[in-house]
Image (cartoon, grey):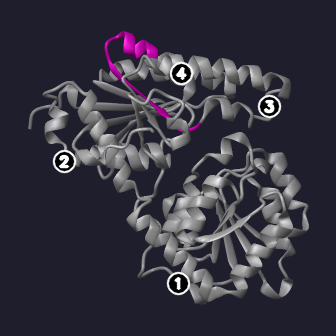
Amino acid sequence: MAAPKALDKIVHLTTVHDRRDTRIFRKECRSLAVAGYQVVLIAPGDSNDVVREDPMEGVRCRLIGVARGRLSRMTRLVWRAYRAARCEQANLYQFHDPELLPVGLLLKLEGRTVVYDAHESVPDGVHSKTYIPRLLQWPLAAVLNVIEKATASLFDAVVAATPAIAGRFSRRKTVLVQNYPVVGELHDDHSAADYLDREPLFGYVGAISALRGIREVVDAVGAVASACDARLLLAGRFASPALQVDLSATDGWRRVEFMGWQDREGVRSLLSRVRAGLVTFHPAPNHIRAQPNKLFEYMSAGIPVIASDFPLWREIVESTGCGLLVDPRDAAAVARAMTWILQNPVEAREMGRRGREAVRTRFNWATQSRALLDLYQRILPPGSPGLASSKPVNNTARQRAG
């Protein structure tokens, strides 16, 4: 077999996300590899400029070291990502972090096809950063908004993770690729315990922070009647060691089983044990219009959700009948929802079933991967070997903003 040509090669870059990131690696990169592209992921790793390849996944991961702080990440690691990207000599580069906008510009100036994958609203994110003084947040958000939009207009395309994000960019260049789950990844009819036989457990998976409602969740599980014996399985990484120390001193912590970071098999195992999944983010600007992975992953796992009562989330939860909505800042309200789940197991099981069916028919990654592959077909040069080797794509599945 002839050696792959440069036109076959797609490079994804991140300096913020782990190389196993669900959206970047497990969904986008793997889908592209299955479609026949050479795929390289440049990402942070504990070895400088080491190349690893897992033939089972079909994605080559090039690790560029680990930053020793935010400033190091935004300077030294960004420079390493650019150098690694140039070495790959790919035809298309897709980057996933706003701090890589200068890298995208440099690659574009070199004649490469460049795609910006916008995971979140940068201006809204500024208002969620507690380390930025409040008086500086509004002017900084305004400046970054102008810079991001102006820079993105120079790239070949923008891939947006939510409709709200897509609405910030040029409709002509923007494609919507949402963070819907892979059907069957987190649920197995043969291995999952029957819902009615499960222990009175609740689950939370993901980044753990006060802004994501962890204080209220821990207080809530502690407030559920002792006769229910409710417990919380908590998986993820704390935003700060101090937060974990503070929570460990609360009454609710005695009902928490902290499991640390879990791989996908660990997440699957956790969700197969619990009665409901919690996604009770506080109403920060970057949360209200977000579509968090965990909301759809809980649905995919066939369990009811207890979610923040935001307009977008309310539309999803109420239209599918997959869970309960609460004020995320009210621990008592969260506790009442937990109690309802435990006291109404048959109705709760039906919520989980409806959520899983909604993922199977509507909120699934297969629909989104087609949109991404369709974008590549449109913006890569004609005659690319990568296009010839790709699986057929349903062009009617194209999803643009607007």
SS of the residue under disc 2: loop
Q: Which residue is mark 2?
A: 391
SS of the residue under disc 3: loop
CB under 8 Å between callouts 2 and 1? no
Q: Which residue is mark 3?
A: 131
CB under 8 Å between callouts 3 and 1? no
Is tag 3's residue or tag 1's residue first in the polypeptide sequence?
3
SS of the residue under disc 4: helix
CB under 8 Å between callouts 4 and 2? no
Is tag 3's residue or tag 4's residue first in the polypeptide sequence?
3
Residue at 28% across, 24% down? 91
Q: Could you tell me residue 119's position as x and y percent?
A: 53, 38
Q: Name the residue type under label 1.
A: Ala
Range of the magenta residues?
105-120
- Label placed on residue 149: 4
Mark yes or no: residue 75 visible: no
Q: Which mark's residue is nearer the viewer, 4 or 1?
A: 4
